[in-house]
Amino acid sequence: MLLKIVALFVSVIHCLSADNKCVPRSFGHSSTVCVCNSDSCHMLESIETLPTGNYVKYTTNQAGLRFVKEKGVLESKINNAQNLIEIGSQTYQEIVGFGGAFTDAAGINIRSLSEDLQDLILRSYFSEEGNEYRLGRVPIGATDFSLNPYSYCDNQTDPEFKSFKLANEDYDYKLPFIHKAKELSKNNLELIASLWVAPGWMKTNPEFTASYSFIKSDMYQVYADYYIKFLDAYKNESVSFWGVTTGNEPMTAFMPKAIPSVGWFPESQGRWIKENFGPTLRNSEYKDIKIIGHDDSTLLVPLILELMFHDEDVKSYIDGIGLHWYWDFLVGMERDNETHNEYPDKFIIVTEACNGYIIQQVLLGEWEGAERYAGDIIQNINNWSSGWIDWNLALDMQGGPTFIKNYVDAPMIVNSAENEFYKQPTYYALSHVSKFAPKGTVRLQVTADISGVGVTALKRPDGSVAVIILNTNFEETETTVRDTTGDISLKLTPKSITTVVYSK
């Protein structure tokens, strides 16, 4: 055993002490991936504390740069500067963090790699050598990205939960990697639990993937108790939660596609929250866990919330609102602003996002996916979102496994046959924001009106400022970041994501 641990340590150190550059590989799409194997893996350095008046710029672009670092010094005010990005002093919402989901599919793929690469893929997400994720989403039972549907109490009607137990999938694919992620994040990882699959005997249609299937009204309290049983079971495995949602995508039950779901009408879900789930959680040892409502797309927001929150008792139990990005390209970010303005005491967090859900395949090295991620994150932050959680941490070359063949893309793609994994451009899109938002970070006022350029700004707890800039233009774009401290003159490379950090 000791030799095994030493071998793993030596392998990881070898990988990290080698020339720490991206080893690019093209798969015929618009950009490249970075290859990670036992010989090399591009890792990220910690963000350094800067002397006053200094800045560091990191660039990722379609041409192949990956988190390339340059240093500089702020200048005095530049006369006739164009394309200004002006940083103000007003602060807004605190940033809860960024992260991904510990699905069965993610665990299956990570586990398919050698131990040194398992370690590297988790370091790439959760450690100071990676994205420094602070959020993780944990399914309560199966999702569509499992090998088969399951709950924790499947065999028979059992309202007392005498047969309740965690599944093998929890012990094989979730818990080991959650524990490792928490260790790598130095216990800065906050977990959010979400449920896709309820025991069939609680539902009007017992099939796991049935459309128009709802919790029976006489099972409302039993269903609330089921959540507590899950929290108890994970507590016994030394895993606690920061938040829990009221259920993943209840609107999916009204769609013809067979995705595991529990359907709700807004009024009936509100009743369950008011009379069962809310009181049960708040009167338990888990009373401090954040209850996140909706956990679905922005398509019918804020209408659904209005139907639920007209009852103040329902509203009082909900701490935050979870949104999925899948219809953002149709409805825009106005819904987020409307939701915040209507319910300013509720935080907003994007609880699920991924590429490939329309074409249902992986596009290795696609740059446009990175632009979608960066653009959506920037817009969400600017419209009151406190966090953004990616979907599967890792998928295979096909975009699975998924028992309903609902293939999608992910920032990390595993090629188990070659014992290697690929860091997609989307991984770096997340790096450019997540790595610069430690606990205590808040959104900062920023003004910019530059064609093809998106911007957001963050004030970090040490007082430094991070400016995240997406350039979707096909040509170099000159811009100037202006603060009371001074100016930073930038040349944004074509099709690029840039993060500038400066000390005031």
Image: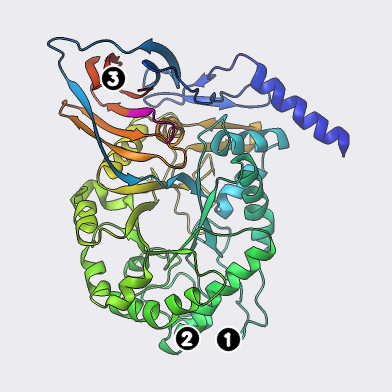
Disc 3 residue type (three-letter): Thr
Q: Is residue 293 above or below residue 190?
A: below
Q: Position of residue 446 (x, y in %)?
A: 23, 32
Q: Is residue 200 above or below residue 62?
A: below
Disc 2 residue type (three-letter): Met
Q: Earlier in the sequence, mark 3 or mark 2?
A: 2
User: In this rendering, does residue 218 appear at all?
Assistant: yes
Residue that label 2 marks: 219
**Nearer to me, 407 or 460:** 460
Between marks 1 and 2, how big is the CA–CA gap?
Answer: 8 Å
Closer to us: mark 1 or mark 3? 3
Q: Earlier in the sequence, mark 1 or mark 3?
A: 1
Residue that label 3 marks: 485
User: In this rendering, does residue 402 appear at all?
Assistant: no
Residue that label 1 marks: 159
Q: Is residue 110 above or below residue 262?
A: above
Between marks 3 and 2, how big is the CA–CA gap?
Answer: 60 Å
Is the Cβ of the residue at disc 1 closer than 8 Å to that at disc 2? yes
Q: Judge the density around disc 1: few (<14), some (14-19), many (≥20) Cα neighbours within 10 Å.
A: some
Q: Earlier in the sequence, mark 1 or mark 2?
A: 1
Kindly state the secondary structure of the residue where label 1 is placed.
loop
The picture quadrant where one finds residue 370 is: top left
